[in-house]
Image: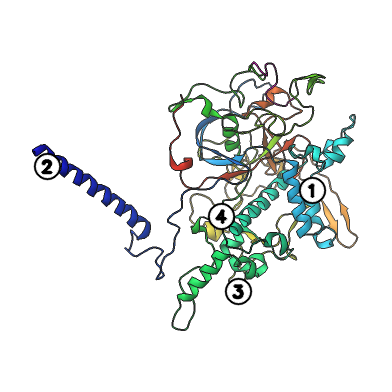
Amino acid sequence: MRTNVALKALIAVVLAGSFAGCNNSKNYKNNSRATGWDINSNDGGFQYQTDYNEQETGPGLVFVEGGTFTMGRVQDDVMHDWNNTPTQQHVQSFYIDETEVTNLMYMEYLDWLKNVFPPEEEKYRNIYNGAVPDTLVWRNRLGFNETMVNNYLRHPAYANYPVVGVSWIQAIEFSKWRTDRVNEKILEEQGYVKEGARYTDIDAGVTFNTETYLNAPSQTYGGNTEISQGGRESERMIERASENTDAEGNAIGDQTFVQRKDGVVLPEYRLPTEAEWEYAALGLSGIREYNAYRGRKKYPWDGQYTRSGDMKNQGDQLANFKQGDGDYGGIAGWSDDGADITAEVMSYEPNDFGLYDMAGNVAEWVADVYRPIVDDEFNDFNYYRGNVYTKHKISEDGTIEVVTPEDVRYDTLSNGKIVARNLPGEIVQTPVTEEDTYMRTNYTDSDQRDFRDGDKNSSRYYEPFQEINDPSKRMYNSPVYDNISVNDSAGTMNRGYDGQRRTTLISNEARVYKGGSWKDRAYWLDPAQRRFFPQDMATDYIGFRNAMSRVGSKYKGKNKTARQK
């Protein structure tokens, strides 16, 4: 009898605890732990997305759970660059493209630009022309490659081949465009913007930009609120706001546009950092056991060899690369990598993260400015060199300044190509100032690309309070390519050349690219290998893929992954 009473009492306590837990959880979602006020009350007050689950995976992306790894290594360093000394790094979870950006994906970008900014109009001509890949990269003085010059980008036979001839700058602009198109579609599907407007109502002065929508929503789509508030959900938000008014009938309290706190739009598509790319390429999850890696990986796949040991495909190469002098694909009838130039994406097995072609096919741009040393003594978390901090420009009337069709900024690159660096609808960016950085300990300047390496402080001639005006005395005495000027009246371009003696090609415009390509030997397939190339130039062997930061939980589904068996 006593046992039954005790059991009933225990059950009552457990149930009470569970109800209390549920009640606490409910209170956490619907009541403020700061004030006790209701959140998302129909009477008004603070509105917040309390039912947010986790970040959705954007189109084309694969989730990569972050962690610690050894970046770089000195292995088979036949080039003696000594620029990949091992360092312990930690990267946050992120997303990265399953494949390289293809010709088809890039053609969609070009098609959108052509429709919105017709190149036959003089003022828009350089927007489209500046985005077109350089197909002449296929030419060789002693080779016949005109077929690729004329067909590789646009012919449907190459639709799913990685795009090449794209500079680092062009890759950045594509990433910005992709961000806006993905978020515009999300807002339309969830009923916030007018349905179908992205096809029918868009022109040069009426475009969507994610940051503009979040920071100056009334200026999105050129200020056309019939588009930006033309969805069913926006109509409900407006109706709800109109019901909550002050004594004079003015709407108060409730929002009429989606805000960042609603968790609707995705973070930006961007180039991966070097640390992210190398971590993703290695696919170390395949050799993980509990809280350690069982060994080191030379390639994105397991083992120390480039050929498949699988009985079905035994002897076939696991990536597309140059096997030797005059051997880009093996003997006819027994092609051992299935390609001579680039190959169609997904032609080879993915690595343990499910990513294709992280070795071979094309090398890939990453976000980082190149330096021979990774400065892990200063930072070993989300390492990245290349930060240039900006802020939104505020007009004299206190509003955020948005780019108009007349305000597009163009850059003339070192090769004479003119590219647009912002598009109508974007927020005008301006460098941060000394006033913004005053008394800060984490950064002091807008441009931090040469921090602790290449600036005057790191020169051997540096003396406090003395300016170094002699370029030859800087740590990196690289060529100056900004000698191009355009005669507006005559329309001619005057190309200048740097005639001074230089000691290095390293500069703040030299960007890292990773991974071997179709024309590289197996040595470059090692994800730790790194090279650099000017950010405004392109080749026939460098492409790119996009990445996206993960916000919120480290784990997808908010659960730890299973231990390696």
Vertical position of residue 248 compared to residue 418: above or below: below
Q: Residue at x 59, y 46 (%)?
A: 58
Q: Work out whether residue 256 or residue 296 is closer to the camera in this orientation and state it.
A: 256
Q: Do the residues labelled 2 and 3 touch (CB within 8 Å)?
A: no
**Which residue position holds label 1?**
132
The amino acid at mark 4 is: Val
The amino acid at mark 2 is: Val
Query: Under tag 1, what secondary structure?
Result: loop
- Tell me the mark number nearer the camera, choosing from 2 and 1: 2
Q: Work out whether residue 404 or residue 195 is closer to the camera in this orientation and state it.
A: 195
- Tell me the mark number nearer the camera, choosing from 1 and 4: 4
Q: Which residue is drawn at 58% across and 28% down?
A: 85
What span is colored magenta in the figure? 311-321
**Which residue position holds label 3?**
397
Q: Work out whether residue 548 or residue 335 is closer to the camera in this orientation and state it.
A: 335
Q: Badge 3, how many Cα within 10 Å: few under 14, some, many 20+?
A: few
Q: Is residue 293 left or right of residue 221?
A: left
The amino acid at mark 1 is: Val
- Quadrant where the N terminus sits is top left
Q: Do the residues labelled 1 and 4 touch (CB within 8 Å)?
A: no
**Which residue position holds label 2?**
5
Q: Which colour scheme is used?
A: rainbow
- Tell me the mark number nearer the camera, choosing from 1 and 3: 1
Tell me, yes or no, whether the highlighted magenta stretch contains residue 408.
Answer: no
Q: Give the CA separation, mark 2 to mark 3.
A: 75 Å
